[in-house]
């Protein structure tokens, strides 16, 4: 069964994601995680989220996905062991040093590699498999034909993003935020500078205005019409982005993808499945409103 993986910024939103059909939820802890502005979970809350997930035979993943500097690694072993005691099902990492340490400690959870490692080919996956990695999150820069090629090898579990924000920098490795605000996006401080509105000039001529502002960010990802192909390709996990999104957003988006995936897997999907969208200009994204059978 293909996994639907949802984000959550706090315990309430984690429960909402599970209740609306997520098979697994990924969260961030108070340490070693990106999205520092999310509420994030202390160890007590992580344990509560794990227990909530496991009572429904679902899974809880914790992001340990910062790119650490030398002094960021203090206390890493203790933190990984604490996550193991909480019985989390996997950690998601962007640093091979953290991945290697988790593997060497021989803990019970799986180690998944983040999209930030820019995994774009099967040779890289072969290497990661050889060192004990359990799952890779493919780079968001891959198109469908590239995903098809990688999936044909069936090397280890794969995960792809299907909905949410698309970083303007390659695989999320941003330096813009740090340059403009002294907030390091790769260590949990992203200011989302790419989503700001800018005055755009060519020479002395102002091209943008309040009615037509310039922004570097793309529209958010939305892949409803490709879900059937992802199921056919045996992608293991379909991932929704957005640990800072609201509970309402999670309920609508997770619930919509859940119903669609179930219809495809049970062969009840048909062209009569109608998807209605609302375009949110402020967010530069498409958000699913409802599904009508």
Image: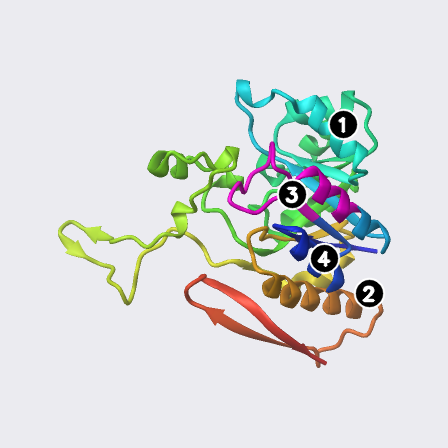
Q: Which mark is residue 41?
A: 3
The span from disc 2 to disc 1 (Cα, nearest Å) is 37 Å
Q: Which residues are magenta?
A: 26-50
Give the mark nearest the N terminus, 4 or 3.
4
The span from disc 4 to disc 3 (Cα, nearest Å) is 13 Å
Residue 148 drawn above or below residue 250:
above
Is there a contact, CB below 8 Å, between mark 1 and mark 3?
no
Nearer the viewer's eye, disc 2 or disc 4?
4
Q: Based on the picture, tell me whether residue 37 belongs to the magenta stretch.
A: yes
Q: Which mark is residue 265?
A: 2
Give the mark nearest the N terminus, 2 or 4.
4
Residue where numbered disc 1 is placed? 81
Residue sitting at x 78%, y 27%: 132
Q: Residue furthest left?
A: 204
* 189 lies left or right of 263: left
SS class, disc 1: helix
Give the mark nearest the N terminus, 1 or 4.
4
> Residue 48 appears at what percent x and percent y?
76, 47
Residue where numbered disc 4 is placed? 15
């Amino acid at each position: 069964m293909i996994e639907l993986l949802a984000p959550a910024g706090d315990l309430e939103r984690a429960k909402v994601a599970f209740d609306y059909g997520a098979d697994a939820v990924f969260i961030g802890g108070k340490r070693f995680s990106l999205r520092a502005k999310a509420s994030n979970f202390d160890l007590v809350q992580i344990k509560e989220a794990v227990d909530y997930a496991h009572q429904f035979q679902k899974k809880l993943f914790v992001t340990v996905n910062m790119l650490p500097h030398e002094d960021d690694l203090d206390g890493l072993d203790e933190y990984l062991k604490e996550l193991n005691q909480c019985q989390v099902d996997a950690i998601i990492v962007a640093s091979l040093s953290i991945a290697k340490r988790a593997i060497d400690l021989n803990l019970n959870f799986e180690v998944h590699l983040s999209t930030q490692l820019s995994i774009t080919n099967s040779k890289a996956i072969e290497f990661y498999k050889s060192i004990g990695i359990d799952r890779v999150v493919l780079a968001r820069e891959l198109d469908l034909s590239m995903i098809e090629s990688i999936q044909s090898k069936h090397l280890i579990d794969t995960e792809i993003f299907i909905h949410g924000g698309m970083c303007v920098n390659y695989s999320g490795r941003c330096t813009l935020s740090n340059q403009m605000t002294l907030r390091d996006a790769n260590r949990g401080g992203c200011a989302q500078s790419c989503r700001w509105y800018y005055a755009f000039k060519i020479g002395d001529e102002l091209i943008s205005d309040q009615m037509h502002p310039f922004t570097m960010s793309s529209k958010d990802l939305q892949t409803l019409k490709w879900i059937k192909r992802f199921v056919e390709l045996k992608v293991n996990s379909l991932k929704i982005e957005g640990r800072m999104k609201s509970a309402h957003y999670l309920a609508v988006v997770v619930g919509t993808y859940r119903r669609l995936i179930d219809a495809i897997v049970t062969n009840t999907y048909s062209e009569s499945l109608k998807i209605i969208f609302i375009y949110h200009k402020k967010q530069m994204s498409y958000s699913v409103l409802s599904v009508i059978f």
